[in-house]
Image (tube, rainbow, N blue to C red):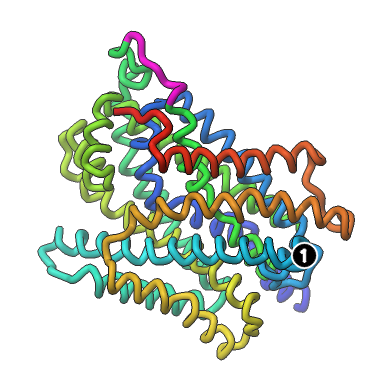
Amino acid sequence: MSTLATTRATPSIWGGVIIIAGTIIGAGMFSLPVVMSGAWFFWSLLALGFTWFCMLHSGLMLLEANLNYRIGASFDTMTKDLLGKGWNVINGASVAFVLYILTYAYISASGSIIQHTLGEMAIAFPARMAGLLFALAVAFIVWLSTRAVSRMTAIVLGAKVITFFLTFGSLLGHVQPAVLFNAAEAHASYTPYLLMTLPFCLASFGYHGNVPSLMKYYGKDPRTIVRCLTGGTLIALGLYVVWLLATMGNIPRPGFIAIAQQGGNIDVLVGALSGVLHNRSLDLLLIVFSNFAVASSFLGVTLGLFDYLADLFGFDDSPQGRFKTVLLTFAPPMLGGLIWPNGFLYAIGYAGLAATVWAAIVPALLASASRKRFGSPHFRVWGGEGMIMLILLFGVGNAMVHLLSSFNLLPVYQ
């Protein structure tokens, strides 16, 4: 009887895989075909594959360092102890900025998407109120437990995968090789636009705030957590490839210029895809999919912010302690969503630069410092100092590309 109870109490590996995949795959994926249209399909796959490799290993480096601390310790504890107060301030500011602004972005996006969805059913509902109610629902789930987030994310991610394949199954059936291989442009240039894609790729593989959450979920079990990170990131990579194939195989490369000129918003891309098949049901499926995409990312991002703030302020895991953490997690972005309800795209853009600090640079520095301090008693990422240097260069390179792009010093496909 006791063995059975223990078995039931052991979390399934799929819970962690779902948390990671659900956090990564969000409404931001709708921007990928637009920003990658210059580099086009095959060069974009190269950028996505390289970014996946680097972001997976930066997450593993974070896990390597985290295993040397108590369960529940997050970025604040590790960075302060291993890298000192200066790096802790820089990292803390970047973590808080990225997670808060993403939480705000998903409140903003959820409000507009819910308003649009209800509008399709002839129900008028203000975006601000929709975003507020949605945020309150997510806050309640996060307050309950990490397991509750995992179960709800499993439901949402399952629905998202189903609507994804229902939506893009028809598109994949209409992929035209001449469009995918861009046969219409005889002397097309792709490589000048490759660097521009990297920061967007990095932003599309953000899950690092959830690594300490998985330690709370599974305990100090590196083998299981490594499988969760690998499985979750591979699912995201696979869905991104299918998404690029479905869009770039149906919309000619020059067609993305007009989409970008109109802001690259979801509704513009949906309209372009609908025009390919002349199928109104595609509109509805894409709207449903976007709802699930925002919901799953919202759950994962807020869980990461919740655990970071709990560690930073030393709140315990009691209902009262979790309530304090939930209040700090949701109150500021909910206020921002009420004041500026339409800031999704701006928020996602500003999050990219700060994400390079805590999703690439700091994990590499933590792994290096952790090895010098503790050795590697629990787990060690392969590749030695060379792998650490690669991840550092990846982070610094992304930051430089982001800055050059901000000052319009990189070529833009237009």
Number of marks in the image? 1
Q: Quadrant of the C terminus?
A: top left
169 relative to 146 in the view: left or right: left
Image coords of residue 131 (percent x, y): 30, 70
Secondary element at tag 1: loop
In percent of the image, x 56 and y 34: which residue is there? 49
Given the current orientation, which residue lies at the most extreme left position? 122
Given the current orientation, which residue lies at the most extreme bottom position? 320
Q: Quadrant of the N terminus?
A: bottom right
In percent of the image, x 27 and y 61: which residue is there? 342
Chain part drawn in magenta: 186-192
Q: Nearer the viewer, residue 46 or 140?
A: 46
Image coords of residue 245 (percent x, y): 39, 30
307 relative to 28 in the view: left or right: right
Image coords of residue 253 (percent x, y): 30, 25
310 relative to 138 in the view: left or right: right
| Amino acid type shown at disc 1 | Lys
Q: Is residue 341 above or below residue 371?
A: below
Q: Main secondary structure of the magenta part?
A: loop
Image coords of residue 225 (percent x, y): 69, 56
Residue that label 1 marks: 220
Is 187 one of the magenta-colored residues? yes
Q: Is residue 191 above or below residue 73?
A: above
In percent of the image, x 21 and y 41: which residue is there? 262
- Residue 200 visible in image: yes
Q: Is residue 5 above or below residue 386?
A: below
In percent of the image, x 23 and y 37: which residue is there? 261
Q: Nearer the viewer, residue 131 or 365?
A: 365
Is 356 one of the magenta-colored residues? no
